[in-house]
Amino acid sequence: MMNETIILLTYYYRPELGNHRLLKYVGKDHLGAYLPWDMYLYKPLREAFSKVILYDYLERRTEIGVKAVNEEIIALVRREHPKYVLWTSWQYDIFESTFAAIRQEGTVVVGWFFDDEWRFDDYSRWRIPYLDYCVTNAVSAVPKYKALGARVIQTIPNTGIAINRDWSHTEETYNVSFVGGRNCADREQYLSRLSRSGIKVDLFGQGWGGYVSFDRMLNIFQTSKINLNFSKPAISFLPKQLKGRLFQVCLAGGFMLTEYAPGTENYFAIDKEIVCFENAEEMIAKVKYYLRYDEERRAIARAGWERATREYTSSRMVAEVFTQIEQDITAKGRGNSYRFKEFKMPLLIRRMASRYHFEWGRALLEENCEKRLWQEELALSLSYTATHLSTWYYKAVGFLPSPLRPPLFKLYGVVERFLIGLRDRLGTFIWLRKIKTNVVNKVLHA
């Protein structure tokens, strides 16, 4: 254990927060999935550091506003003098100037990034200049970080704790199960193919009947003969990625049948510790096979559990990350080699940040919160993109007396739903979405 203090800046997003009077506005497009950070990071950090301070910037900004949150974080650092600040990134809640102020205090700032297989170009790379270290679970992103001069640590996706199992007696409630959202890539088509093949799949998650608790999810993994996992991100033509679900299922002692993602074989022995498929036909064939051969299936599940328990717990992951950082600081000292000239943020990226702050401003204004709070958010939105029309609309509405505002909010909602519907209809043309993605990538790499 290091006799040091670390501050964990995180968003402890829970499913019930989707109904929060402010978060319901931003939850659909801008908030991450439920992740039990206490298990993944807080408890492992407490094993590695003598003092861990948890700061939930998502919940706190609903109480005091985004500017006050950033001021509070800086004050916390100056009071506690931590060696590290660990930031679990998601959106644009923490200002660049806040990171700069923290680093001026002599604190090492570590950014922990997720989904870099598809988020690196439009999000992660623009945070690099303000951090001392970047942590990613995407092997493909490591050379991109290094090309920009970042000090990067590669690790596995969020995992968890190993669950003890009595392998002499395995309770199997479900034949085949899947835990995850419905509206993501082509997973619904895959599951429909299974159903048409006469294979019943028990489905859990958003779109199938709602979230299940984390404990219930682990119980499902343990009591399913076959746990399915899909490796595509939200949009099916984006690169497949190594999912945390792979490690969660194995840590619980479940049998894992997963869509293959590049690099899977670096973590588990395929067909010995987990089983993979490349397409729907192979998935169906392997489901039928492993439902038939119980002993072989249970032997693979146990081997996967033993490997995960030995190598892939959150405690081990966190300890290894900070061991590497400590070794790097000892060898190279502090400082970085970021090439700041390359970090002029393109309009497309600035529009994402602008949209995020607009949604917060909209929520605060429609909920009739303190004037200062919604004005801060709308001003931040315009600081990224001065031509954001929705922001100007809400800024103008904000000058009106409160009783006159609701009809204008409603009008905006009608127009917004129409445009979203139009976008979704156009989005059904995969070729059009690919063209858009290619154009965006060319702009970002220009």
Image: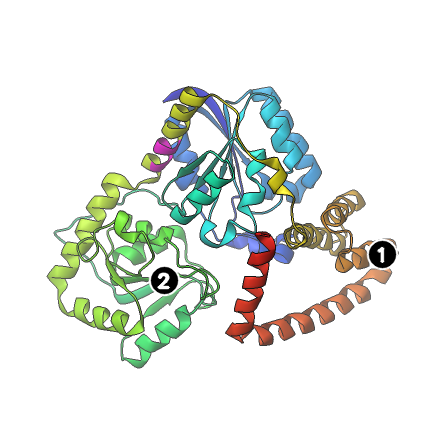
Quarter of the rendering occupied by the N terminus: top left
> Disc 1 residue type?
Ala
Q: Position of residue 182 (x, y in %)?
A: 45, 67
Q: Earlier in the sequence, mark 2 or mark 1?
A: 2
Residue 284 drawn above or below residue 101? below
Residue 266 bears which disc, if any? none
Q: Magenta part of the protein: which range?
A: 317-321
Residue 126 drawn above or below residue 402? above
Q: Position of residue 53 (x, y in %)?
A: 51, 29
- Residue at horizontal 72 percent and vertical 67 percent from the top: 413
- In the image, 77: left or right of 190? right
Instruction: Please give the residue where the numbered disc 1 appears in the rendered image.
Output: 396
Q: Quadrant of residue 229?
A: bottom left
- In the image, 316: left or right of 15? left
> Disc 2 residue type?
Phe
Q: Decide whether the magenta segment is chiefly helix, strand or loop.
A: helix
Instruction: Please give the residue where the numbered disc 2 appears in the rendered image.
Output: 230
Mark 2 to mark 1 CA distance (whole Å): 45 Å
Can you see residue 392?
A: yes
Q: Position of residue 176 (x, y in %)?
A: 27, 67
